[in-house]
């Protein structure tokens, strides 16, 4: 058989086998290339009908299979939060699919105020559940703030520079209880004016008050240096004869537990006020009754 006859025979066999590639699906390119991680491009198929490329690990959807053995494959689409897809399997030398862009990271969603029943309900920005308020807070003890080298403000549940002088370094040895920052000793009220406070020169710190006349009709607590409604029962009117020593408020809320609401279900008959607890037995699994009449340590 002559050389020209052999060549035509090979061509005829190739056409019957699907573009010299064996079966259409086997040698024509079973699938387009897999899109690379982070949006790398997928390789194009050989001739014939193939399957679309598989999406990369960070990719979008894989490309669709080519529809005939003549047209080249189309480029894959870019991903959104995921990476790009592989190209469509092509006919004669399909075009490789292009990778998409890597997705962007999410925005933290647990920084806002969040209700909770336990620490499991809280996120990394406010990881501790305050059992009294039912709200996620940044801290409940100083140990919760140790990673930041800070102290815990138990009132706001936030990590602060200082809560007491013991939290401050030598060069700024005094904790300003209003701003919770370590400062040098104040020398005059002028240094405390921006905080609407006065200077306790003995301690060298800014405080809310030093005397009753700085409290607009109230009383200045000699220990806390803050303005309160009362310091003793003698400061209270007949219709609210009891002074709560913790809050410095005159009140008469109860004579028994029946007068209290579910949030503060226990009546202190001496103070006539409702609290979360008045004895350790009122706390159950929450721990013990603390001096401020809240349960803790559970």
Image (spheres, grey):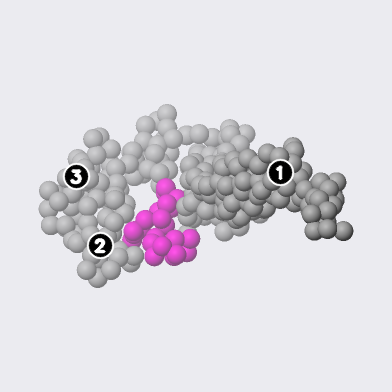
Q: Give the mark toward the camera: 3 or 1.
A: 1
Left-right relation of 199 to 88: left
- The Cα atoms of the two marked residues, 3 and 1, are separated by 77 Å
**Dot placed on the residue nearer the N-terminal end, 1 or 2:** 1
Q: Which mark is residue 174?
A: 2
Residue positioned 19% across, 62% down in the render: 184
Element on which disc 1 rests? loop
Asked if 82 appears above or below 3 in the picture, the reply is above
- The Cα atoms of the two marked residues, 1 and 2, are separated by 79 Å
Does the image show residue 77? yes
Q: Which residues are magenta?
A: 142-164
Q: Is residue 146 magenta?
A: yes
- Report the residue marked by disc 3: 194
Element on which disc 2 rests? strand
x%, y% of residue 131? Answer: 57, 48
Which of these two is toward me, 234 or 159?
A: 159
Which of these two is toward me, 10 or 277?
A: 10
Quarter of the picture holding the N terminus: bottom right
- Report the residue marked by disc 1: 91
x%, y% of residue 261? Answer: 58, 34
Q: How many marks?
A: 3
x%, y% of residue 294? Answer: 53, 49
Residue positioned 40% across, 44% down in the render: 247
Task: Give residue 146's quadrant in the image.
Answer: bottom left
Left-right relation of 293 to 43: left
Q: Single out the residue that lies furthest toward the right.
A: 1
Mark 2 surroundings: few (<14), some (14-19) or many (≥20) residues within 10 A: many
Q: Single out the residue that lies furthest toward the bottom.
A: 170
Discs 2, 3 touching: Cβ within 8 Å? no
């Amino acid at each position: 058989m002559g050389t020209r006859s052999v060549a035509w025979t090979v061509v005829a066999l190739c056409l019957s086998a699907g573009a010299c590639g064996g079966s259409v699906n086997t040698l024509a390119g079973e699938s387009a290339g897999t899109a690379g991680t982070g949006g790398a491009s997928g390789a194009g198929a050989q001739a014939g009908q193939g399957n679309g490329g598989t999406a990369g690990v960070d990719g979008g959807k894989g490309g669709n299979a080519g529809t005939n053995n003549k047209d080249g494959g189309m480029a894959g689409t870019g991903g959104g939060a995921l990476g790009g897809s592989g190209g469509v399997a092509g006919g004669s030398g399909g075009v490789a699919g292009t990778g998409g862009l890597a997705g962007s990271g999410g925005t933290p969603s647990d920084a806002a105020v969040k209700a909770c029943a336990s620490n499991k309900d809280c996120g990394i920005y406010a990881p501790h559940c305050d059992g009294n308020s039912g709200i996620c807070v940044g801290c409940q003890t100083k140990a919760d703030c140790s990673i930041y080298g800070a102290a815990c403000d138990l009132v706001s549940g936030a990590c602060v520079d200082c809560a007491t002088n013991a939290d401050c370094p030598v060069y700024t040895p005094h904790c300003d209880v209003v701003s919770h920052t370590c400062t040098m000793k104040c020398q005059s009220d002028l240094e405390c004016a921006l905080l609407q406070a006065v200077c306790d020169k003995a301690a060298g710190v800014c405080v809310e008050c030093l005397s009753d006349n700085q409290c607009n009709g109230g009383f200045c607590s000699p220990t806390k240096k803050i303005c309160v409604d009362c310091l003793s029962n003698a400061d209270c009117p007949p219709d609210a004869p009891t002074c709560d020593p913790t809050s410095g408020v005159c009140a008469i809320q109860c004579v028994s537990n029946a007068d209290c609401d579910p949030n503060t279900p226990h009546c202190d008959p001496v103070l006539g006020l409702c609290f979360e607890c008045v004895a350790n037995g009122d706390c159950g699994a929450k721990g013990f009754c603390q001096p401020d009449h809240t349960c803790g340590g559970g």
